[in-house]
Image: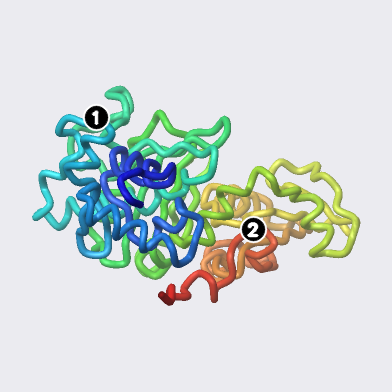
Amino acid sequence: MQNKLSNEDIEVLKFLSKYKMLKVEDASLIYKTKRYYRQRVNKLISKGYVKKYKSYIIIDKSGRKELGMIGSGYIKNIKNEAYMERLRHIASIATITINSCIEFIPSWDMKEKDKYTETARRYIGKMRVEDKEYLIYYISSKKEHIYIKQLLFDINKSLSYDNIIIFTENFDVICKKYSNLSFGKNNTYIILNTNSNKEIIKNYKNIDVHELLEGIYDKEILISNWDKANYLLEDNTYIVFMPFINTEQIERINWYYQENTETPKKVEIITLKENADVIERTINNKCKIKTFDKNLLGGISEMEEFKEDII
């Protein structure tokens, strides 16, 4: 590094100035390398641009000076574990902005009009993906029933948002107590917080879903004439393309079957393998589940997902 910061070094500092923390291994997304990034991070640490906090880095004095920051980069509540946990969740989801056109606005930068409640706010920010805006929540595997109950109460109060994403570390923490997570929104997505799924979200706009489905089914895929499905097979089977769990879409389908008990309509939900069990427990039993591998959507393999870097 000598005394000169690279463009990637500056990007790390900018990320920290906006989101306050970055997991060391997530710096590889900025440096675009699986090993060399550790050397760069260590140099930033040795020069006082960043400092370690457990397995994360936060901005340090030289880093603030480099960016012309005055105090705003400090994390004042570093001994407050609940606060630091929230920052870790924000930093994890914020990595979705690296090398993408997606924008993530952390909760402290949201405009006052977005703060629909003054206390016990549970959202961690909002995300802009093309022309849509999503209110973002995060449920860790450690969260207790009372926290999740408060979070769901918050979602019900978020009248300004028609699209919600709940990132979670596993489905068990939700499914054990909550069978219905629909709120009358346009979309409420439940997404496992993995690097692979974040890559899928980044790349989703480039996916030709029609072509993808024709490859999976090896049949001609027609456009659906039913508003609750995306596509249609020649045998009148409706296809609902749901790579991530969408509780609102599931609720609309369930409601249709409840109101039309004698309908012969056939529906197939096509989703990532990791979602199949949850959807099967919540969707009407007249629907079939068909899964596909996330590699087809640009997600990384499970081996890559969890492989440790070897230095």
Residue type, numbered disc 1: Gly
Answer left or right for 144 relative to 230: left
Q: Position of residue 110 (x, y in %)?
A: 32, 30
As drawn, which residue projects farthest toward the front? Answer: 2
How far apart are the two marked residues, 2 and 1, measured between alpha carbons?
38 Å
At a point 74% along the width and 50% down the height, the residue shown is 209
Residue type, numbered disc 2: Gly
State whether residue 48 appears in this view.
yes
Q: Position of residue 145 (x, y in %)?
A: 25, 62
Using a 10 Å C-alpha cutoff, classify the residue at mark 1 as few (fewer than 14 neighbours), some (14 to 19) or many (20 or more): few
Residue 68: image tag = 1
Picture layout, residue 122 above or below residue 142: above
In depth, the one of 67 and 55 nearer the eye is 67
Occupied quadrant, residue 13: top left
Answer left or right for 195 relative to 21: right
Which residue is under mark 2?
298
Q: Position of residue 114 (x, y in %)?
A: 33, 28
At a point 19% along the width and 53% down the height, the residue shown is 84
Picture layout, residue 118 above or below residue 201: above
| Local secondary structure at mark 2 | loop
| Local secondary structure at mark 1 | loop
Occupied quadrant, residue 234: bottom right
Picture layout, residue 187 above or below residue 307: above
